[in-house]
Image: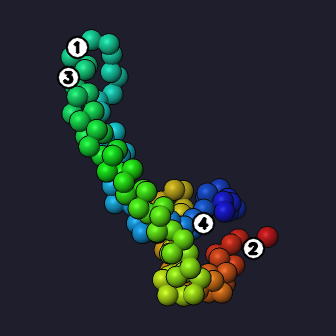
Amino acid sequence: MRWRDAKGVCWRIRRHRLAGVRRIKPEWANDIIPGGLGQDPISFLLALPAMIVLAVLVPLWLVEWLIRLLLTPFAAVLRLTGQVPYRVTVLRNNQEAAFHTPRGYGELRRALAGLRPQR
């Protein structure tokens, strides 16, 4: 859920639905890529480290994603019964402002109702 407050600050409530926390991020290769790549051979040599990192990270990320996807139904049942807490993040201008871990569906609904803006 997204909204803007009276001061123009953008708020967002994000529920993490997949099982586990993402550990491998292919976006890390973007930090290595130099800007303004052209079509010359030197540009290829400059981009080569990023391509190698991507070639390693993308398969690892896909395996991790598949494992998380397969475990999600079990995590959903465990979250509904309150054995494993839900994960709810409140973002303020795309920066984490708060993190909540309610246990059980009833506590999740109460937490979300308390976080939503009053209209």
Q: Which is nearer the N-term, disc 4 or disc 2? A: 4
Q: What residue did someone put label 4 on?
A: 13
Query: Are the two marked residues, 1 and 2, in contact with CB atoms closer than 8 angstroms?
Result: no
The quadrant in which the N terminus is found is bottom right
Could you tell me the amino acid type at mark 3? Leu
Q: Which residue is mark 2?
A: 118
Crowd tier of the residue under label 3, counting other residues whose Cα lies within 10 Å: few below 14, some 14–19, many 20 or above: few
User: Sequence-wise, which precedes: disc 4 or disc 1?
Assistant: 4
Residue 103 sits in quarter = bottom right
Horizontal and vertical percent position of residue 75: 50, 75
Question: Mark 2 is on which residue type?
Answer: Gln
Of the two numbered discs 1 and 2 in the rendering, the one whose residue sits closer to the viewer: 1
Residue 33 screen position, x and y as percent: 29, 33
Nearer mark to the viewer, of 2 and 3: 3
- Spatial CA distance of label 4 from label 3 is 42 Å
- Which quarter of the image is occupied by the C terminus? bottom right
Tell me, yes or no, whether the two marked residues, 4 and 2, touch with CB atoms within 8 Å.
no
In this figure, which residue is indicated by the disc labeled 3? 45
Q: Secondary structure at mark 1?
A: helix
Name the residue beneath numbered marker 1: 41
Rendered location of residue 114, percent (x, y): 66, 80
At 33% from the left edge and 46% from the top edge, which residue is drawn?
59
Going from N to C along the chain, the mark reached first, 1 or 2, is 1
